[in-house]
Amino acid sequence: MSAPTAVATDTARPASLLVWRLLSLLYDFFPALALWMLVGALFTAGYAAGHAARDNIAPFSALQWLLWGCCWVVTGVYAVESWRRGGQTLGMRPWRLQVVRADGGAPTLGQLWVRYAVGTVSVLLAGFGMWWALVDRQRLTWHDRASGTRLLRLPKR
């Protein structure tokens, strides 16, 4: 995969919220779930090595918060590296979505991490930052605006 290149503005357009963005998130849930299972299995194996076989990690314990934090970071690495290596995650490819800078170039690593962090806050607030695109004049989400990036829908090849 190569880094995203500038896209002609007459062929690519901002991605609509309800259809393409949400379908992309649904598709990306599955690779994320696989990563969470892997991280959870590693935590469980490490925890089981020092405890009785029937003991579980206590809910809301420091170890469980660490597990959740690790899952968030691993998901972020998946998303940011996918965006950095071609502007698309696995879930974005079938829908022809691509993350680019506001000027159409390849986003920086910092922009992509800001996009992921603000996108997380948006999802935690019942997707309000994504629903914002319905009233935004440029159809931009919170994470689009905060990171200086855009999500474009590419034309069919």
Image (spheres, rainbow, N blue to C red):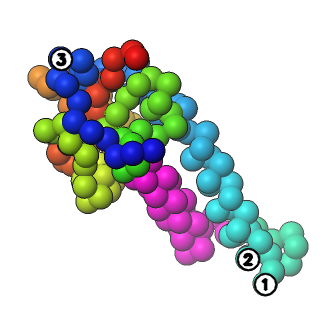
| Image position of 2 with respect to 9: above or below | below
Q: Nearer the viewer, residue 138 or 2?
A: 2
**Amino acid on which disc 2 is placed:** Gly
Tag 1–tag 2 contact (CB < 8 Å): yes
The numbered mark, 1 or 3, whose residue comes first in the sequence reads 3
**Label 1 crowd (10 A; few <14 / some 14-19 / many >=20):** few
> Which residue is found at the position 29% from the left and 33% from the top?
151
**Amino acid on which disc 1 is placed:** Gly
Helix, strand or loop under label 1: loop
- Residue 94 part of the magenta-drawn span: no
Q: Quadrant of residue 136?
A: top left
> Which residue is found at the position 88% from the left and 73% from the top?
53
State which region is magenta: 58-83
Q: In which quarter of the image is residue 1?
A: top left
Helix, strand or loop under label 3: loop
The numbered mark, 2 or 3, whose residue comes first in the sequence reads 3
Q: Label 2 belongs to which residue?
A: 46
> Which residue is found at the position 33% from the left and 17% from the top?
155
Image disc number at residue 10: 3
Q: Label 1 belongs to which residue?
A: 50
- Residue 74 part of the magenta-drawn span: yes
* Secondary structure, magenta segment, majority class: helix
Foreground label between 1 and 3? 3
> Which residue is found at the position 60% from the left and 44% from the top?
31
**Where is residue 41 shown, x and y percent of the image?**
73, 63
Q: Nearer the viewer, residue 90 or 11?
A: 11
